[in-house]
Image: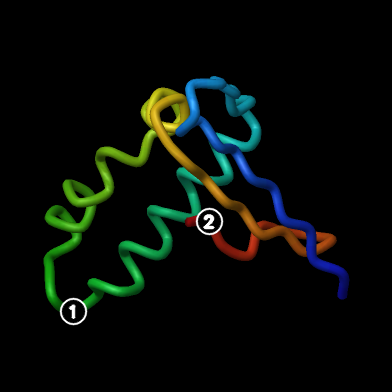
Amino acid sequence: MPMKVRIVDNLNGETESLNDADADLVATLIKENTKAVNQGEYSEAELEMLCAFAAPETIQQEVTKGFLVSLFSSDRTLSTY
């Protein structure tokens, strides 16, 4: 299965935005990963609080300040850094 890499590099002052669909994918991936890694350590309510920052709008704002790498397979997002 081929893999694509998408890089958003805003560290050199050239701002690139993240569209709504990609921001939603990144937010979902962060939430799923945060919950999976912390399952059993926190209650469901605490996990929701840990994930509160991962809203698509917040992700779009943060991307304008830094560096984002997303790995995609042909059918889904594999990982975001």
Q: Quadrant of the N terminus?
A: bottom right
Q: Residue furthest front?
A: 12
Mark 1 vs mark 2: give the one in front.
2
Q: Is residue 22 left or right of residue 55?
A: right
Q: Under tag 2, what secondary structure?
A: strand
Cα gap from disc 1 to disc 2, whole angstroms: 24 Å
The residue type indicated by label 1 comes to Gly
Task: Please report contact status of discs 1 and 2: CB closer than 8 Å, yes or no.
Answer: no
Q: Residue at x 54, y 20 (%)?
A: 15
For this orientation, the residue located farthest to the bottom is 40
Q: Which residue is mark 1?
A: 40
Classify residue 37 as left or right of residue 76.
left
- Residue drawn at the location 56% of the way across and 21% of the way down: 14
Which numbered disc covers residue 80?
Answer: 2
Q: Residue at x 49, y 29 (%)?
A: 12
Percent x, y for residue 81?
48, 56
> Which numbered disc, 1 or 2, marks the residue that appears first in the sequence?
1
Total numbered labels placed on residues in the image: 2
Q: Residues within 10 Å of mark 1 (few under 14, many from 20)?
A: few
Q: Residue at x 38, y 54 (%)?
A: 31
- Quick one: 61 or 66, which is closer to the camera? 66
Q: Nearer the viewer, residue 66 or 12?
A: 12
Task: Please provide percent x and percent y for residue 34.
Answer: 32, 62
Circle 2 crowding by C-alpha within 10 Å: few under 14, some 14–19, many from 20: some
Give the answer, above or below, for where 46 lies relative to 6: below
The image shows residue 20 at horizontal and vertical percentages of: 60, 26
Image position of 78 (left or right of 63): right
Asked where in the image residue 25 lies, by quadrant, the reply is top right
Residue 18, above or below 28: above
Label 1: element kind: loop
Q: Amino acid at mark 2?
A: Thr
